[in-house]
Image (tube, helix red, strand yellow):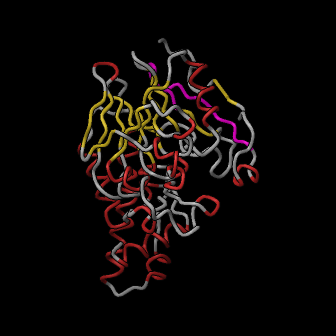
Amino acid sequence: MKRSLCLAVLTLIGVGATVSTYEARQPRASLTVHDVADNLYMLANAASVQGMGGGGNTAIFVTGDGVTLVDTKVKGYGEDILAAVRAITDKPVTTIINTHTHWDHTGTNVEFPDTVNVVVHENTRANLASDDCGDGTGFEGGSIKNCDSFKGANARFLPETTFSDKITLGSGPDQIDLYYFGRGHTDGDTFVVFRAARVMHTGDMFARKGLPYLDVASSNGSATEFGRTLEKAAAGIGGVETVIPGHNPVPLTWQDFVDYGGFYNDIVSKTRAGEAAGQTVDQIVGSYSLPSEYNDFVAAPDRLRATVQYLVDGQ
């Protein structure tokens, strides 16, 4: 297929009825398709959408046999994703890869046929199958790790294909490499590399140019390991030029991803230095300044405090 959408030319208006309390309270998000590479597209919230919108960014990859999706947004957006696919190709969706377990990245898995092959890291599969679905702090009182969605008859939608460190799907121009480098945002974050396209989907290991949300409580994420996982990914993955982030409204670059690791690990270093000097969490946060080389990144006060607290607590 030739590149036909030319860098963000298709805007989709949300379709279908509201299907949850969340959607009843939120305006339906407009979604935009970005043409990232030959046969590879990013379905994102329009730049004007505030907050969570339709959820995380979805990659649409057209292969010789069908369509592979990476991440499926929040509940109720399955038809929106299919509308974007139909505007690109008449091939069916055959594979879904979830970068991690959260409801804004796995929300519409159950809105696709149960014949679709779902591929995840083994820890993500365990989270989705868990009976410990949270304490009401997640999606409108549900589980942030979305295991509620896969109970009862919906257990048939649980992923069938899992991996531990690396798995390759397809070959030649259709090759997709999946990597796991350790805990971070959750304990099952997958880096998805479209080899021929030189593109990587990071999920929420690089959501945007800001500090991450660290799901320590629900999905065994880790502030202490997050920076090391980023370093391992930067060192262990080659040949990537473009990055599809977890939530940023436009694609970013490989250098942005490398810089993100530097930005995060600078906070780790300053936290450790503050601890060594006997500073409290408040003092470490109060003395933090953003290095000039990372001036296009954002350390929001609430995320900064949470990150420093986790680091001090060894979590």
Residue beneath the point at 50% across and 77% down: 286
Q: Tell whether 254 sits left or right of 83.
A: left
Residue drawn where x is 36% and y is 65% of the image = 222
Query: Main structural element of the magenta stretch: helix, strand or loop?
Result: strand
- State whether residue 253 is above or below residue 26: above
Q: Is residue 34 magenta?
A: yes
**Residue 214 located within the stretch drawn in magenta:** no
- Quadrant in which the C terminus appears: bottom left
Question: Where is 188 relative to 76, above or below?
Answer: below
Q: Is residue 193 above or below residue 256?
A: above
**Could you say where residue 24 lies in the image, as x and y percent from the top left?**
76, 50
Evaluate whether residue 313 shows in this view. Answer: yes
Residue 75: x %, y % from top left: 61, 45
Q: Residue at x 64, y 32 (%)?
A: 80
Out of 100 and 185, give the one closest to the viewer: 100
Position of residue 110 measured from the top left corner of the image (x, y, whole percent): 54, 40
228 is higher (above) or lower (below) than 39: below
Q: Nearer the viewer, residue 75 or 234?
A: 75
Q: Which quarter of the picture shows residue 119?
A: top left
Query: Is any atom of residue 296 visible in this view?
Result: no
Magenta residues?
28-42
Q: Quadrant of residue 235?
A: top left
Farthest top residue in view: 2
